[in-house]
Amino acid sequence: MSKNRKRYLKKIKHTPPGTSPGTIISPPGAQPTHIDLIAYGPEGVFEKRITDWIEVTEAQKKYPVIWVNIEGLGNSEIVAQTGEIFGIHRLALEDVMNIQERSKLEQYGENCFFVVHMAEMKEALETEKLSIYTSKSFVITFQDGPIDVMNPVRDRIRKGNGLIRKMGSDYLTYAIVDAVIDSYFPVLEAYGDLLDKLEEGIIEKPEREMVGQIHSLKKEFFALKRMAWSLRDAISAFLRDASPLFSPETRIYFRDCYDHTITVLDFVETYREFLSDLMDIYLSSLSNRMNEIIKVLAIFTTLFVPPTLIAGIYGMNFHTQLSPYNMPELTWYYGYPYALGLMLVVSLSILIYLYWKGWLGSLKIKSK
């Protein structure tokens, strides 16, 4: 088994073999844990980074919806404590700690547990898992890395835009999932620009590095497809199995999320097919470029073969005194200019003939 495969398997399940279900262990390299609270209702908003759970309890008495965001999974004790306070099942908390968990939806009694993946384009595709635990009066989100696509949701809560302050925790869950799906579209736009530039480069000057770039993009598209595919299945299962936690109105909004996920998958599939076409274009451009180079070399060879033949003939130097047939040109006063002129006339005649037949074509080979 390759080292990359072993490393990937270790990321999928970092708990030791034989560990009992529900064991909460921080993943390797997890960030320090911070707790952010947003409590809101139609009348107002309370937002704070908290260090004491009493503030959450007090906020629950004043506001109908509580949103607690656990950022950083480095402190497993805080994660376990969060589960005890809000009644989160330990199996759900174990899934929170497994950073390579696929997108899914699970029911825990009347509560729902979502796993989705955020995406961001930097130098390459970067992804981060987001776990969402939803109850009637609160939403708990868990994330570890620097990617955060939920700021638009926070701004809507602060400004009171739309329906979010008038709705319950089910609508907040929809808003978060919708923000996650929306994060895919800037990534797809960046990929579209990258593919356009790659296509132009392949057509103008195919280089060996482009093959590695194509294979790297294929891997990234495969990862993006896997995330979008599992997210689509999770939303489909949610729409198929009615949950009393989500109102019929909110379920309508989730149908819109499903449509957006299908759009993402369509784009990913289109880009993957386009990558295959780019590989074919690369091979075709490389072949055409090689043919042009060979064509130029063949023309130069054709032009220089007659002068070489003439020079070879007059280089034999058979003495004229031994036979009248032995190259009388050797004794001519203008023998040397004659030989050079003959070479030039023959070469020019061949060049004119090639041009007249249309075999020269475009001999310009781009150097950049």
Image: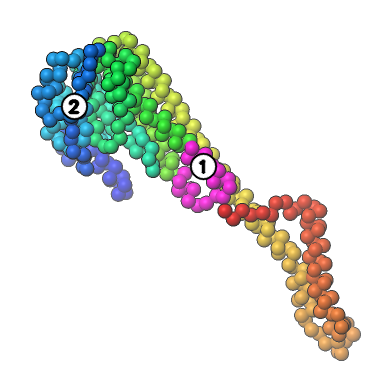
Q: Which residue is drawn at 65% across and 57% down?
A: 294
19 drawn magenta: no
Q: In this view, does 137 lie above or below 268?
A: above
Q: In this view, does 198 lie above or below 64?
A: below
Q: Which amino acid does label 2 sit on?
A: Lys
Q: Which of pointers 2 and 1 indicates the residue nearer the eye?
A: 2
Question: Could you say where residue 50 lies in the image, as x and y percent from the top left?
Answer: 15, 28
Residue 197: mark in rendering: 1
Tell me the number on the disc at residue 48: 2
Res. 231 in view: no
Q: Tell me the amino acid under the disc marked 1.
A: Lys
**Residue 265 appears at what percent x and percent y?**
43, 28
Q: Residue furthest right?
A: 324
Side of 176 where 290 appears, left or right: right
Could you tell which of marks 2 and 1 lies nearer the N-terminus?
A: 2
Say above or below: 174 vs 148: above
In the rendered image, the residue lying farthest to the bottom is 321
Secondary structure mostly seen in magenta is helix
Under tag 2, what secondary structure? strand
| Residue 366 seen in the current view | yes
Range covered by the magenta-colored residues: 193-214
Residue at 36% over, 13% down: 252
